[in-house]
Amino acid sequence: MNNNIPAAMAPLMAKAFTTGVETSIAQLAELLGLPEGDPLWAVEAVVRTIEAWGLELNPNQARGSLESARVLRIPEVSTSKAAIAKLLAIGEGSGVEFKSSLLCSIRDWRQDGTLNEHPALPGEVLKTVCAFLNSDGGELLIGIDDDGEPCQGIERDLELKGWDFDKWQLHLVSLIEGRFLNGAMVMPYTRIQLHQLDNAAIAHVTVMRRTARSFVRREKSRPYEFFVRNGSRSDSLDLPSFYAHLQSRSDI
């Protein structure tokens, strides 16, 4: 890796190698001290440089403009079982949320062994993702019940649909891209990793804070909503509360 990092880049790089950070090609070009000139040359220079540092820029240079918001971070991060155990020990709060499943009602399965798809469950997952995007980011664990215990919720989703883990993950990605306003630009702010913990599948969804406001439809027929974290809750804001939220954000 090239260690010749300009001092102006240091704060951005520190975040890029930990949680990831929001930036743009134009900002990176300025921090790297690239001379003004051909935009295509600047894009190529930025991409070559960050790749040499072992980082990725998402969405890549083929989407958006030089000023479009993008995510700079390590291409792949493997979450350890210890990290998940730490989140379980912390419990739900402003930056941590547990969901039993994405599709199947675990309550019904526990009561009588039936596999019933609950149409509101995907919206609850999307609501949490939206609230993390609009707040300070967070960690969502799917496959964990309200008591903080693995509940085989993802296994029930797979059994219900006849899917494998890859198809389950692709479905979650399609929900994010399809239900969020401009969902293709939202997806780079999330990471989805599947793990096994105590013989149960756990999906660890890491969500970064996003400067642009994020709006989501909990169901296809519903209007877009705006959510923020309020302690361990994800609250929908009405119009006056939304404007108050905008005024309180320092990154506007």
Image: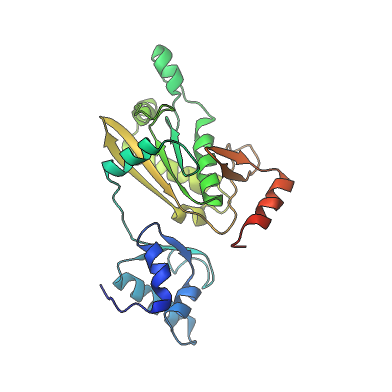
The structure residue drawn at horizontal position 62% and vertical position 46%, both measured from the top left corner, is 226
Residue 114 visible, this angle: no
Based on the displayed image, in which of its 4 quarters is residue 61 positioned? Answer: bottom left
In this rendering, the answer to whether 214 lies above or below 230 is below
Q: Which color mode does the image show?
A: rainbow
Expressed as whole percent of the image width and height from the top left, the position of residue 18 reads 36, 58
Closer to us: 109 or 8: 8
- Could you say where residue 49 lies in the image, as x and y percent from the top left? 34, 75
Reply above or below: 18 against 3. Answer: above
Q: Nearer the viewer, residue 100 or 94?
A: 94
Pick out the residue farthest to the top: 112
Query: Looking at the image, can residue 151 be seen?
Result: yes
Estimate the x, y position of residue 241 in percent, counting from the top left: 70, 46
* Picture coordinates of residue 4, whole percent (x, y): 31, 79
Q: Residue visible at 38% across and 28% down?
A: 153
What residue is drawn where x is 48% and y is 81%?
A: 39
- In the picture, the quarter occupied by the N terminus is bottom left
> Is 250 on the left or on the right of 39, as rendered?
right
* Residue at the extreme front of the image, as rendered: 90
Image quadrant in which the C terminus is located? bottom right
> What is the number of callouts on the image?
0
Residue at position x 42%, y 68% from top? Answer: 12
Q: Is residue 116 above or below residue 65?
A: above
Which of the 4 image quadrants contains residue 152?
A: top left
Left or right of 120? Residue 190 is left
Judging depth in this view, the residue of 69 and 166 nearest the camera is 69
Q: Does residue 155 appear left or right of residue 136 in this picture?
A: left
